[in-house]
Image (spheres, coloured by chain):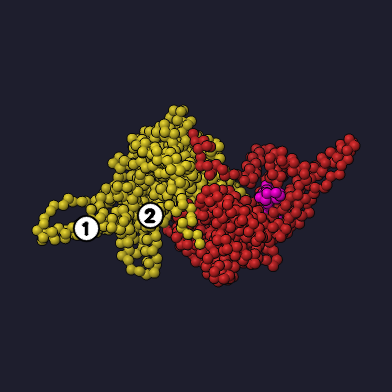
Chain colours: A yellow, B red
């Protein structure tokens, strides 16, 4: 029998994130509840990752209606469905071989959809042209990232490819880099400046990497996952200049581009800024931007589709992007079609326009209001400090935990925030993400949930947190009183 | 700019198959036609791979109706849709988090669907039990194969993992093995015995591999892709004994298990045979069986789903299967649901039963009749010899081409069968697969197409083939007559 020692050493060393161990614990709890076990909560709620439908956010009707017709084209004659919905379905079906979503597509995606993505980008960037030949559709943005990182992956030891990655970063990124065989070189984001990118820190990270690996790319998440930071033009330009000077490929995760909600803040793409810069940058900086169907407003995570736009890559190298996508044969067709629908919503005059505009407005308003509401509740908790988010779907509060809690966590060999999240799950059935920033303790929670779910989340989190803190305060008081009774009075600093 | 020399050396050496170059040529031709170029054909037809919907095979109504409802649950109240369809949709929606196909699933797939797959396998194998914990759903069977092969991949040079692979084999397999970094060790199938697996040949292949690599698995395609061979119990048992003796993991591609049509022939799974064997085999042979939604009868290639069942694998190693599936986050949910529908069709008494039974009967009958019809036409062509297929979707005729043609192909540095297929595409707009068996020349054509499309395919192929042969015969006659006129008469053997 194949044993652990016989398997691929690169696979064997992949570390499963704390997220996975929480999910396993959650599954056990759900199973217990299903078997009738008595708990103080009736169900688990998971806000640890961006999966809005799971928590009850409703799918966008327009997208679902068109896809239902594409799957069952007899519905084209169903007059209860809006005319524009049926026309869009007809057009999308025509773009599929044999007019069926059951046919394979080219490995880089349907030509029609790639063309439509290019049109969307051109419009978004106020006329900076995009070309379908530079667009590659994949089974999620993560798959596209894997293809690029694997392409850049080479060498061993100090010759191994390095990628500059933010701390904190999307929680799935470390495993992806590990599987691709590249070394992550962390640069710290500045928590006190709402998690901004700091140029000096990029230089510091880069210089520490020399001799340990060969840094060949820098990964940026904008709007930030999990920080909620949105970069302004100046910051983007600085990063581009840095990448150009250091000959790094720019990997820009822009999956939350449609979810910027802070006042006086807007999403500006790296590509737009690049094309406003001098020719020497415009024509040389290798930029790859990722977008996804799983993003905030559409949130069709289960349909699995994303894409990347590649700028300034050697065409010969680009051929290998296609080759690598080939091994998946093709991206799920329903997901590809949904990309078209996400990027080209109904227009004024279309029968679905009003309903669609209202639905998406409501979703954005929910996201914005939830972020404000959660921020307030979190910052009212003792020992919790949260930066306001400008976009994306997460809040990422910092935990300042009393020494006793940190010590208790240490006995279980867990980081204190991971330990905190395990307890929270066990006691309240609430799944919140943990960690990601060594040396400090953080939580990650998605606010892309229905408002009543958010209230439930905040209530469970608050009551757990206060209970934990009070329990520890009581323990402390007890210790102190014991000490007093032993006549050994000592003053202790308040930890929270 | 990243240049070719900077990219992952393992990626750089992946060879694009002749299939890909044919597809690129086909795209050019299609574009020319769209631009109004005059051709002797009005469109291209692609029967080079298994993509039935592309050629006009209709999707199975039951599956599409249920999926349409799952995407747009308001259709649950649509009384024009059959009751059993609506009930199935309701049940499947309940198995999704948030009752939405837009939610992620566990990386190994929805629990409900994995359970249903296990039930199907247990029924198929007359009671040999299957367990959902051993079932892993993935974005296509190819993805599942990639996970396993990567898991086994290790070492360099003579320590590199080797996998025994059939010749001919599925045309996507060589690239998959190359990307995973394992060495393919070919064993020849016996054309004259309808492409049977020959035990002596397995031993020969294995012994040649010693010293070149470390053989750790054997890949079997049954029913055979592209051969159409279906193994009997005895042959399967021999292979299992061989794998057991040589400590090889058995990777069994059984994606065409529902498409065995030869008389007195049935599909028997490797698992069933294994569980009829002695305990020493039953409890030790590592067996992984792959199945797919893209198979013949359902043919939902574009929805992207497949699964594998893993038998006798060390649980610690199996954890890494899960870890590796994690990087894709989750398999497209519509595809997962379609697996359930494929494996559990409507039953007698259900409102959809009659229509569904008729549709799938018609599909199987088409496949069977097409295979018979194509076999006859192919074997009537001079210089073509085709073994009858017992199952699957391909015919794989052998080409005995005249010397002049082989020489002409040689001047273009193409194998004669690849050259033949290029010419066929240019002159007739017909895309047929080529090659796969060094030292001889073969074509690969799918017969899972509508009967009138098959007639068109055979007509284009026949007219091209006869024209080519006659052209060469005329050239030969001309040469001969020139020679005669020069008084140098020589007899030449007839090549075809």
Residue A83, horizontal then vertical, whole percent: 53, 49
Q: Residues within 10 Å of mark 1 (few under 14, many from 20)?
A: some
User: At numbered mark 1, what does the secondary structure look like: helix, strand or loop?
Assistant: helix
Chain letter, disc 1 residue: A
Write the residue at 58% across / 70% down.
B277
Residue B80 appears in view? no
Determine the residue positioned at 68% across, 40% down: B413
Q: Earlier in the sequence, mark 2 or mark 1?
A: 2
> A187 or A392, which is in the foreground?
A187
Residue A19: give its label. Answer: 2
Q: CA distance from mark 2 to mark 1?
A: 26 Å
Q: Nearer the viewer, residue A276 or B423?
A: B423
Q: Magenta span covers which residues?
A: B428-452
Q: Residue at x 34, y 52 (%)?
A: A434
On residue A472, which mark appears? 1
Q: Is A477 placed left or right of A286 in the picture?
A: left
Q: Which mark is residue B22?
A: none
- Which chain is home to disc 2? A
Q: How far from the left and from the top, in percent, is residue A411?
A: 28, 58
**Which residue extends farthest left?**
A487
Please state if B62 lies on the left or on the right of B381 as rendered.
left
Looking at the rendered structure, whether the residues under marks 2 and 1 are on a common chain is answered as yes
Q: For the residue labelled by badge 2, is the local secondary structure a helix, a strand or a loop? A: helix
Q: Is residue B258 magenta?
A: no
């Amino acid at each position: 029998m194949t044993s652990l020692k016989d398997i691929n050493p690169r696979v064997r060393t992949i570390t499963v994130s704390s997220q996975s161990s929480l999910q396993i614990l959650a599954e056990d709890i759900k199973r217990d509840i299903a078997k009738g076990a008595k708990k103080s909560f009736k169900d688990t709620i998971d806000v640890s990752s961006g999966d809005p439908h799971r928590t009850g956010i409703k799918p966008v009707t327009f997208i679902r209606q068109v896809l239902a017709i594409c799957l069952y084209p007899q519905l084209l004659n169903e007059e209860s469905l809006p005319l524009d919905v049926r026309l869009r379905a007809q057009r999308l079906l025509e773009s599929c071989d044999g007019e069926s979503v059951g046919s394979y597509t080219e490995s880089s995606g349907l030509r029609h959809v790639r063309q439509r993505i290019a049109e969307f980008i051109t419009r978004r960037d106020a006329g900076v042209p995009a070309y379908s030949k530079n667009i590659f559709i994949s089974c999620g943005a993560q798959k596209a990232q894997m293809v690029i990182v694997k392409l850049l992956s080479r060498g061993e030891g100090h010759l191994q490819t390095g990628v500059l990655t933010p701390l904190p970063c999307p929680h799935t990124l470390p495993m992806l880099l590990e599987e691709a065989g590249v070394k992550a070189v962390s640069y710290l984001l500045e928590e006190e400046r709402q998690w901004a990118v700091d140029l000096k820190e990029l230089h510091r990270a880069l210089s520490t990497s020399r001799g340990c690996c060969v840094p060949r790319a820098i990964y940026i998440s904008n709007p930030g996952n999990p920080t909620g930071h949105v970069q302004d033009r100046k910051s983007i330009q600085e990063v581009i200049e840095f990448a150009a000077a250091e000959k790094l490929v720019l990997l820009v995760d822009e999956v939350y581009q449609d979810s910027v909600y802070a006042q006086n803040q807007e999403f500006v793409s790296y590509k737009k800024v690049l094309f406003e810069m001098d020719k020497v940058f415009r024509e040389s900086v290798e930029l790859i931007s990722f977008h996804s169907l799983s993003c905030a407003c559409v949130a069709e995570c289960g349909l699995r589709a994303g894409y990347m736009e590649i700028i300034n890559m050697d065409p010969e190298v680009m051929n290998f992007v296609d080759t690598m996508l080939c091994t998946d044969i093709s991206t799920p067709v329903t997901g590809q079609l949904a990309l078209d629908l996400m990027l080209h919503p109904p227009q004024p005059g279309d029968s679905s326009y009003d309903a669609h505009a209202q639905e998406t407005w409501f979703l954005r308003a929910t996201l914005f209001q939830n972020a404000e509401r959660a921020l307030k509740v979190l910052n009212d908790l003792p020992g919790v400090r949260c930066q306001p988010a400008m976009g994306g779907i997460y809040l990422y509060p910092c935990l300042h935990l009393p020494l006793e809690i940190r010590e208790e966590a240490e006995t279980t060999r867990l980081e204190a925030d991971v330990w905190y999240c395990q307890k929270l799950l066990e006691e309240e059935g609430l799944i919140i993400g943990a960690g990601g920033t060594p040396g400090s303790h953080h939580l990650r929670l998605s606010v892309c949930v229905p408002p009543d779910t958010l209230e439930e989340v905040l209530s469970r989190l608050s009551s757990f947190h206060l209970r934990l803190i009070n329990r520890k305060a009581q323990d402390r008081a007890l210790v102190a009183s014991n000490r007093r009774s032993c006549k050994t009075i000592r003053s202790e600093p308040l930890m929270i």
